[in-house]
Image: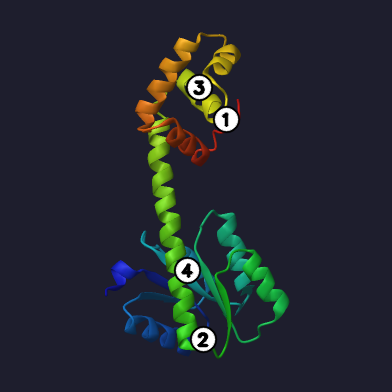
Amino acid sequence: MTGASEGTVFIVDDDASIRASLQGLLRSVGLRAQPFATPEEFLRSHRSDGPSCLVLDVRLPGVSGLDVQHQLAQTGVELPIIFITGHGDIPMSVRAMKSGAVEVLTKPFREQDLLDAIQQALDRDRVARLRQEDLAVLRKRYDLLTAREREVMGLVSSGMLNKQVASQLGTSEITVKVHRGQAMRKMQAGSLAELVRMAEKLKLSSPA
């Protein structure tokens, strides 16, 4: 098992001994660890493209882990977070989890609990990355459609019959079928049901 295949775990904690301890633990199970003493160092760093997650101390000098979580969300960084804290309280834990945290662990925590949370976080990130890759492929295909093919795809995917689409667009049913066929070919959809699923992923299912 190698770190490259399993994922990268970013660690942000101002305690050097905790950073070293976590880094050693993760290395022992084949995970690549990147420790940081401050959120600023982490936010400035170049992060790898593979599956990853963040182990984040709640109480940091000058800024809280919850603030870092909010800042990442604001900048569009979707990174699963595991909070660790020596001063855990229920309101803080609830706020962290509602904002998408995978887990909140109170020090001292069992190593296995942390490893389990990290595995869950990396699995979540892998799924998210695959979903993003799939969506990127669909968007490239969608860009190949003409404006009318996009209209037809959106209307058909919203549940309208060919004759209803034709009426709305002021064209013939035969023409609608041609545009629908072209959209299916360019989107590489094997069936109308598959085209509908693609439209849902692209958020095209509502009538224009």
The residue that disc 4 covers is: 121
How far is mark 4 from mark 3, CA to CA? 39 Å
Residue 171, x across and y down, in percent: 53, 9
Picture quarter containing residue 74?
A: bottom right
Choose between 85 and 121: the one closer to the eye. 121
Q: Is residue 106 visible?
A: yes
Q: Residues within 10 Å of mark 2 (few under 14, many from 20)?
A: few
Q: Are marks 4 and 1 in contact (CB under 8 Å)?
A: no
Q: Residues within 10 Å of mark 4 (few under 14, many from 20)?
A: many
According to the image, what is the colour scheme of the structure?
rainbow
Whichever of callouts 4 and 2 sits on the residue coming sooner in the sequence is 2
Asked which secondary structure carries label 4, the reply is: helix
Asked which secondary structure carries label 2, the reply is: loop
- The amino acid at mark 4 is Ala
- The amino acid at mark 3 is Val
The residue that disc 3 covers is: 152
How far is mark 2 from mark 3, CA to CA? 58 Å
Q: Residues within 10 Å of mark 3 (few under 14, many from 20)?
A: many
Above or below 48: residue 86? below
Whichever of callouts 4 and 1 sits on the residue coming sooner in the sequence is 4
The residue that disc 2 covers is: 15
How far is mark 3 from mark 1, CA to CA? 10 Å
Whichever of callouts 4 and 3 sits on the residue coming sooner in the sequence is 4
How far is mark 1 from mark 2, CA to CA? 54 Å
Choose between 84 and 15: the one closer to the eye. 84
